């Protein structure tokens, strides 16, 4: 009989409910518990998805029948909740950003290593089939060598966000995607960012310079009424365009325009399936703590650049 990983979800807001739903859909997982500091939300999630519910994270973590947890609490609580889970020996997935700061992210990583606990970070676009297709096209040299990656991630401010700005909430997706597509780290960042309507920055324009010829440009804001999630990869022999939402990929080159056919799949389901399978099969996570830390470090370099009005070198403390 196939072993099922016993999982729990900490944080039952909008995204935590999605985690609970997906775990109920996975044959290889069994959702055994949920928790939220808001008792009504915890009860609602537990009742809806047939799991025990708690308003105290420690009560959930003390359960022997929980193999792993996913943490979907506000970013400012990630370090505290993640370290609690690590102290109870639970393998974990922490939603992005891994923590409020790169410094806190390192503390989580070191705690997990010391406790021999496995840590994955929820950079969901890595599991978007459209992103995977773009990566395959780049690696096979379908349109030559990459010159520029340009992303646009704009929409109105989501009410669920309250403790980070647009750089660590939105732009960090594309920071990680660009690292993933190129298999390289940016060396320098220049950014313009500010706040027009919110406490934290609500718009940002970020340029990433890589050690070789490639560059990345990221536009992110919470000011645009129409939601856009797009990536354009300019190469030496053509252009690849991706709509993150529809997952449609278009290739334009000297032969014309071509749209490869492949099946739309829910990225969150693919991500959580990967998390579960990696633990059951003792495989390396596709997105580990180092990925989460590096994406945060680049985001912080962008914020620093915006304040200084000059480019900032990207450094890591690994």
Image (cartoon, rainbow, N blue to C red):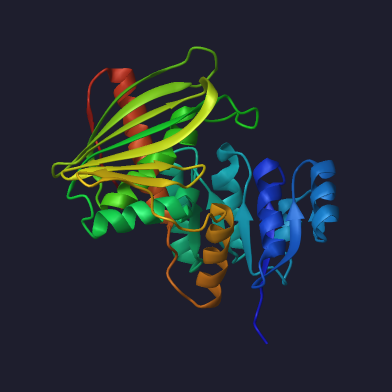
Residue 192 screen position, x and y as percent: 33, 20
- Compared to residue 42, the image places residue 306 above or below, namely above
Give the quarter of the figure containing the N terminus.
Answer: bottom right
Task: Please name the residue shown 71% across and 52% down the image.
Answer: 57
Q: Can residue 106 be seen in this snapshot?
A: no
- Compared to residue 161, the image places residue 38 above or below, namely below
In the picture, measured across the screen, residue 28 lies left or right of residue 233, that is: right
Task: Please name the residue shown 31% across and 48% down the image.
Answer: 179
Residue 82 screen position, x and y as percent: 57, 52
Toward the left, the furthest residue is 212
279 and 79: which one is in front?
279
Toward the top, the furthest residue is 196
In the picture, measured across the screen, residue 4 lies left or right of residue 201, that is: right
36 and 2: which one is in front?
2
Residue 93, picture quadrant: bottom right
Q: Can residue 316 be seen in this snapshot?
A: yes
- Compared to residue 219, the image places residue 182 above or below, namely below
Toward the front, the furthest residue is 255
Residue 107 screen position, x and y as percent: 45, 50
Task: Please name the residue shown 51% across and 44% down the image.
Answer: 246
Task: Please name the residue shown 56% across and 76% down the image.
Answer: 280
12 and 180: which one is in front?
180
In the picture, measured across the screen, residue 300 lies left or right of residue 223, that is: left
């Amino acid at each position: 009989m196939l072993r099922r990983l016993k999982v729990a979800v900490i944080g039952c807001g909008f995204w935590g409910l999605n985690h609970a739903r997906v775990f109920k859909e996975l044959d290889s997982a069994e959702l055994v518990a949920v928790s939220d500091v808001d008792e009504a939300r915890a009860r609602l999630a537990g009742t809806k998805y047939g799991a025990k519910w708690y308003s105290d994270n420690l009560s959930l973590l003390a359960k022997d029948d929980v193999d792993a947890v996913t943490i979907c609490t506000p970013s400012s609580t990630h370090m505290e909740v993640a370290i609690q889970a690590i102290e109870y020996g639970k393998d974990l997935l922490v939603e992005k950003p891994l923590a409020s700061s790169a410094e806190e992210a390192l503390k989580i990583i070191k705690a997990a290593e010391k406790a021999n606990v496995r840590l994955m970070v929820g950079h969901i676009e890595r599991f978007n089939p459209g992103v995977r297709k773009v990566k395959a096209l780049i690696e096979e040299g379908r349109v030559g060598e990459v010159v520029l990656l340009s992303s646009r991630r704009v929409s109105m401010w989501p009410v669920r966000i309250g403790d980070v700005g647009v750089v660590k909430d939105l732009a960090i997706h594309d920071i990680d995607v660009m690292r993933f597509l190129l298999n390289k780290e940016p060396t320098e960042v220049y950014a313009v960012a500010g706040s027009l309507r919110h406490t934290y920055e609500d718009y940002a324009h970020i340029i990433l310079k890589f050690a070789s010829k490639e560059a990345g440009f990221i536009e992110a804001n919470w000011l645009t009424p129409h939601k856009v999630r797009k990536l354009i990869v300019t190469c030496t022999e053509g252009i690849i365009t991706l709509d993150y939402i529809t997952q449609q990929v278009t290739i334009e080159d000297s032969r014309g325009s071509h749209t490869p056919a492949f099946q739309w799949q829910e990225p969150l389901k693919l991500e959580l399936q990967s998390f579960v399978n990696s633990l059951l099969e003792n495989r390396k996570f596709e997105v580990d703590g180092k990925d989460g830390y590096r994406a945060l470090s680049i985001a912080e370099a962008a914020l620093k650049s915006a304040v200084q009005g000059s480019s900032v070198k990207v450094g890591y403390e690994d």
